[in-house]
Amino acid sequence: MSAVNGNVLHLDLIDTEGKEFALQSGRATFVYFMRAPTCQQCNSAVRKLAAKRDTLRGQGVDVVIALPTGTDDAVAWKTAKSVPLDVVTGRTGTAHEEAGLLRRVFGLIQQSGGILLDANGVVRYSHIVTNPGDSLRLQELEEAIANMPVSR
């Protein structure tokens, strides 16, 4: 996992249209890593993030959902769930692997959680867990956003 406050996170991502997706867009970005498209707790977290999308955008933060699947599965999930957020997968392997999220419990359970990057791609907050029920801590995220240095 990338360390907070200092490391720039680079991920080789593609969106649901098969196009390269850059996290360094000149805006801060919160990447939420789902355990799986079928994970109920993760889907609940995505609904919460979607409901806060406009508030987060107003604070200068975009939300991106990373799935540990292929693009076809990501498209199907995004369509079926009517997700209004950007959804990405890894170009080769998974974004989860690139970011250091492990598979625990004998490789059966994918870690989930989130990473907040400032506009320069510097990691400002991360919360990664094996229990997906604790993968989104909105209050901690809001505090991290409030305390994020202004980008230059």
Image (cartoon, rainbow, N blue to C red):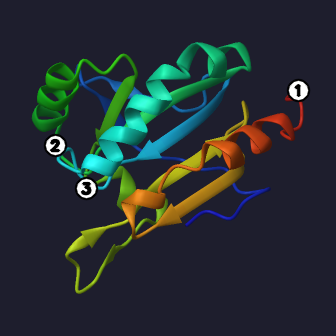
SS for callout 3:
loop
Q: CA distance from mark 1 to mark 3?
A: 33 Å
Instruction: Please identify, in this view, whether the residue under mark 2 or under mark 3 is nearer the observer.
Output: 2
Taking the image as drawn, is residue 73 in sight? yes
Which amino acid type corresponds to the residue marked 3 in the rendered image? Gly
Q: Which residue is mark 2?
A: 70
Going 38% across and 57% down the picture, which residue do you hit? 96
SS for callout 1:
loop
Instruction: Please identify, in this view, whether the residue under mark 2 or under mark 1 is nearer the observer.
Output: 2
Mark 2 touching mark 1, by CB under 8 A?
no
Which amino acid type corresponds to the residue marked 2 in the rendered image? Gly
Q: Quadrant of residue 73?
A: top left
Q: CA distance from mark 2 to mark 1?
A: 35 Å
SS for callout 2:
loop
Q: Which residue is mark 1?
A: 152
Query: 79 or 18: which is nearer to us?
Result: 79
Q: Relative to residue 90, is residue 126 depicted above or below?
A: below
